[in-house]
Image (spheres, rainbow, N blue to C red):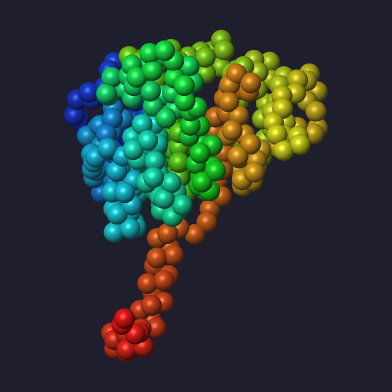
Amino acid sequence: METKLTAKDFSSGLAVKWCPGCGDFGLLTMIQRTMAQLNLPHEKYAVISGIGCSSRFPYYVNTYGFHSIHGRALAIASGVKLANPELFVWVITGDGDGLSIGGNHMIHAIRRNIGLKIVLFNNRIYALTKGQASPTTLQGSKTKSTPQGNPDYPFNPANFAVSLGCGFVARGVDNDLNYGAEILQKSALYKGASFIEMIQKCVVFTDKEFDVYKNPQTKDETTVRIEHGKPMIFGKNKNKAIVIKDCGPTIVEFDPALPPKDLTIYDWTNREMAYIVSNMTPPEFPLPLGIFINAPSKTMEENYAEISSKNLERKNIADYFSDLETYEIN
């Protein structure tokens, strides 16, 4: 009889060296649950990370893995995946590691549609290097590198990934373990590049920054859950909804007993809708959580195998040498 794996089976048993209360603990639990849910043997997984608090992740999961160098996790993970396409390759990165020094690798991993499970831990700060502004730090925020306030416009990671053409993009929060694991499970089964932004607090530098999205007293008004095939209803009394009109979002209010029939139904295969909704930011709109897009397309691994196969069928060594004779050397 097949043994059912549990999240505990994917714990390495090593002491976890994150600050008590760090949001990374919740994300570790989510991914261990996801691995157990897939019920694949440990050797089918590889976890690749760069540098940062989040990048200690490979030590804490009972799988293959690399704790690599700053910003290069995606380059190394791409090599791992292309060398062995059967592996489930997870990339654990932070907002600094993945969007600053690693930004170019992020762009091209998504463009190539390599089947990587990219999980970006977004705490809006460089935490391991002691509190400098990161690419997602909000404008006006006072940090060690911006003591008078951050003058930069921040990245919106989920919208960034949608804009690049990523076929699976989602956003979760560190304290919603069940919903986060559900998103990650769908991501794991997606064949191409998937990108999940996880809002994650740093107890030292951004301890209270995300409380408004988690507090039971406020989260119903400040977040909206995006679900395929359903209207985008939110509010403590479920009396508000996001409606897309004239190529933009707007908030409508209504009697929850008589919801309007023309509410926008979310479609995660619609890239234009995904762009509009992922681009919504507080305080003008609630923070959208959930899966923005789930639209499969042929992966780089499939394209590579197809091209290689055709070349092997069409050519042999003698053909290649005969082809060289047709070129002129200047």
- Give x and y (percent) for residue 179: 49, 30
Residue 274 versus residue 193 in the image, above or below: above
Percent x, y of residue 249 = 69, 31
- Image vertical order of residue 26 relative to residue 166, above or below: above
Q: Position of residue 81 (x, y in %)?
A: 33, 54
> Furthest residue to the front?
330
Q: Which quadrant of the figure has residue 195?
A: top left
Give the residue displayed 80% in from the left and 34% down from the top.
262
**Along the viewing direction, whichever of 69 and 41 lies nearer the viewer:** 69
Residue 220 is left or right of residue 77, and the answer is right
Judge left or right: residue 1 versus residue 141: left
Height in image: 79 above or below 238? Answer: below
In the picture as drawn, the residue positioned furthest to the top comes out as 217
Taking the spot 72% from the left edge, 38% from the top edge, the residue there is 247
Q: Is residue 33 visible?
A: no
Query: Along the line of sight, which residue is nearer the eye, 96 or 50?
Result: 96
From this view, report whether residue 87 is shown above or below residue 65: below
Q: Residue at x 44, y 15 (%)?
A: 149
**Quadrant of res 306:** bottom left
